[in-house]
Image: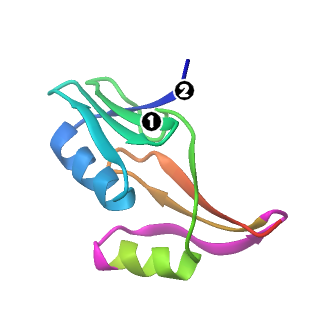
């Protein structure tokens, strides 16, 4: 078995654009008006359309950065994706938080330990 993280979204097309910008290396493995799956090696992020989502209640999602957070912040800003919480020190390294189009908080972590 392999884990699939499901993100409930209100607009498939706009949300797919957001997540493809955020995860450009992800392979599109399935798509329909109701379900789209992006593969990242052994992990997947699946977008599932829903008419009944409360802001920020879809799930919790964290991404492990493979480049410095400053580079990611610049890419986000270039693509007009707002940073909800700027880069902060953490016990494991550093992190920042953005939100997807439906308000889901996404923490991006840079591990140094």
> What residue appears at the point 26 percent right and 46 percent down from the top-left corner?
15
- Horizontal side, residue 50 vs residue 93: left or right: left
Residue 70, image quadrant = bottom right
> What residue appears at the point 47 percent right and 41 percent down from the top-left corner?
56
Vertical arrangement, residue 46 with respect to residue 22, above or below = above
Q: Say which quadrant the C terminus sits in.
A: bottom right
Residue 44, labelled with which disc? 1
Q: Earlier in the sequence, mark 2 or mark 1?
A: 2
Q: Name the residue under label 2.
A: 3
Where residue 105 appears, x then y in whole percent?
51, 50
Cβ–Cβ under 8 Å for marks 2 and 1: yes
Residue 47, image quadrant = top left
Asked if the stretch drawn in magenta spans residue 61, the answer is no
The answer to which of 19 and 51 lies nearer the viewer is 19
- Range shown magenta: 78-92
Where residue 49 appears, x then y in whole percent?
26, 27
């Amino acid at each position: 078995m392999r884990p699939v993280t499901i993100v409930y979204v209100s607009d498939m097309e706009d949300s797919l654009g957001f997540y493809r910008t955020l995860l450009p290396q992800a392979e599109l493995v399935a798509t329909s008006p109701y379900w789209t799956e992006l593969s990242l090696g052994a992990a997947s992020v699946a977008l599932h359309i829903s008419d009944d989502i409360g802001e920020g209640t879809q799930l919790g999602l964290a991404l492990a950065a493979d480049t410095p957070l400053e580079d990611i912040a610049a890419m986000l800003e270039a693509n007009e994706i707002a940073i909800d919480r700027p880069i902060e020190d953490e016990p494991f390294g550093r992190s920042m938080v953005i939100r997807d189009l439906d308000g889901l908080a996404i923490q991006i972590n840079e591990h140094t330990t």
